[in-house]
Amino acid sequence: MKGIIAMLAIFISVTAFGQSCIGKWVTIDDKTNKKKSIVELYRKDGKLYGKIKYLYPREGREPNAKCKECTDDRKNKPLLGLQLVRGLKWDGSQWHGGTIVDPEDGKIYKVKMWLDPKNKNNLNVRGYIGPFFRTQKWVRVV
């Protein structure tokens, strides 16, 4: 009986946080379709956060690039280790209610994320400013 209860508890905890976005993801630029970085998504106090773990080399980028365009507490912080994603909540089908910053231009977007139902190794990341949005596809690092 205890085994059944334990299995049920594990099942409930997995479904409570639904789609597992926890882990490392390769970010793909929605304009150029090129790899930009590897972001690690992690859960803290029941919310989803993400920080840059690796930057793919790019012409014109300084080796120790900083978020020069950011306007909040991330201003002039190194891109490597920068917390891009903040405070998303799980609603049963997607993560939402937090923010994501684009370190290229410093814009902060409301964001929602969900796994591609056809391929759980693809994460849809949609940033909103008002009625306008941008969507990127991130690919799980395996």
Image: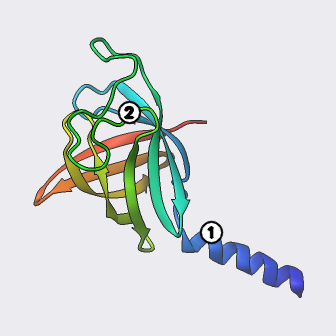
Residue name at image x 58 percent, y 72 percent: 15
Residue name at image x 41 percent, y 40 percent: 82
Return the x and y of residue 7 as percentages of the image width and height: 78, 76
Using the image, determine if residue 139 lies above or below residue 49: above
Return the x and y of residue 48 as percentages of the image width and height: 46, 60
Residue 87 visible in image: yes
How far apart are the two marked residues, 2 and 1, measured between alpha carbons?
Answer: 32 Å
- Left or right of residue 10, residue 101 in this image: left
Residue name at image x 31 percent, y 51 percent: 100
Farthest-out residue, top: 59
Return the x and y of residue 9 as percentages of the image width and height: 72, 79
Amino acid carrying label 2: it is: Leu
Q: Secondary structure at mark 2?
A: loop
Using the image, determine if residue 58 lies above or below residue 74: above
Colour approach in the figure: rainbow
Q: What number is the disc on residue 89?
A: none
Residue 94 visible in image: no
Per the image, the residue denoted by label 2 is 79
- In the image shown, does 82 or 1 lie closer to the viewer? 82
Using the image, determine if residue 54 lies above or below residue 89: above
Per the image, the residue denoted by label 1 is 14
